[in-house]
Image: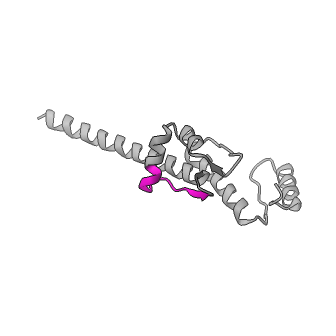
Amino acid sequence: MSNILPDDIQALRDALEASPGEVTVTLNLTRKTAEKVLDLLEAEHSTGAVVVPVKDLFTSTEAATMLGMSRPTLMKLVDAGDVEYVRVGSHRRIPMRAIVKYQRQRQADHEASLAAADQFQSNISFDGDR
């Protein structure tokens, strides 16, 4: 919390109290805090759900659990360059932004596959009607 200035916190509180609708406020944030706010807003926009991580870097076991896969599967994705990581000493840690990015890509790929399957089904139905 030390990255956010106390004046910014108070400005946000005052703006929320003053308006029952939209809130307009100007804040001075560190880059890291601004990135966290952006991640929060993007998560809410894309999934409707908001998860606020307690930390920025996760072990491969933690990240695999969050992604709903085994650790070896995650490590294959890391080794292939599909999931980014950072080195902390001799260990690889997965940043929260990399977890979110992979989740979004997986969701987009899933939606594209469904659309392709629907298109294929439509083509089969159309051809079968002849």
Seen in the image, is 122 located left or right of residue 97? left
Residue 76 at x, y percent in the picture: 43, 48
Seen in the image, is 89 located left or right of residue 22? left
Which sits in the foreground, 101 or 114?
101
Look at the image and name its color scheme. one colour
Above or below: residue 107 compared with residue 7: above
Seen in the image, is 37 located left or right of residue 11? left
Q: Quadrant of residue 123?
A: top left
Q: Residue at x 75, y 65 (%)?
A: 30
The quarter of the image holding the N terminus is bottom right
Look at the image and say whether residue 81 sits in the magenta stretch: yes
Q: Residue at x 44, y 49 (%)?
A: 77
Residue 16 at x, y percent in the picture: 82, 51
Q: Which residues are magenta?
A: 77-88
Q: Quadrant of residue 122?
A: top left
Above or below: residue 71 compared with residue 27: above
Residue 116 at x, y percent in the picture: 30, 44
Q: Quadrant of residue 63?
A: top right
Q: Residue at x 59, y 56 (%)?
A: 90
Which sits in the foreground, 15 or 89?
89
Residue 29 at x, y percent in the picture: 76, 64
Look at the image and say whether residue 79 sits in the magenta stretch: yes
Residue at the left extreme of this rendering: 130
Q: How many numbered marks are there?
A: 0
Which sits in the foreground, 70 or 118?
70
Seen in the image, is 70 located left or right of residue 21? left
The quarter of the image holding the C terminus is top left
Above or below: residue 61 compared with residue 13: above
Which sits in the foreground, 61 or 117?
61
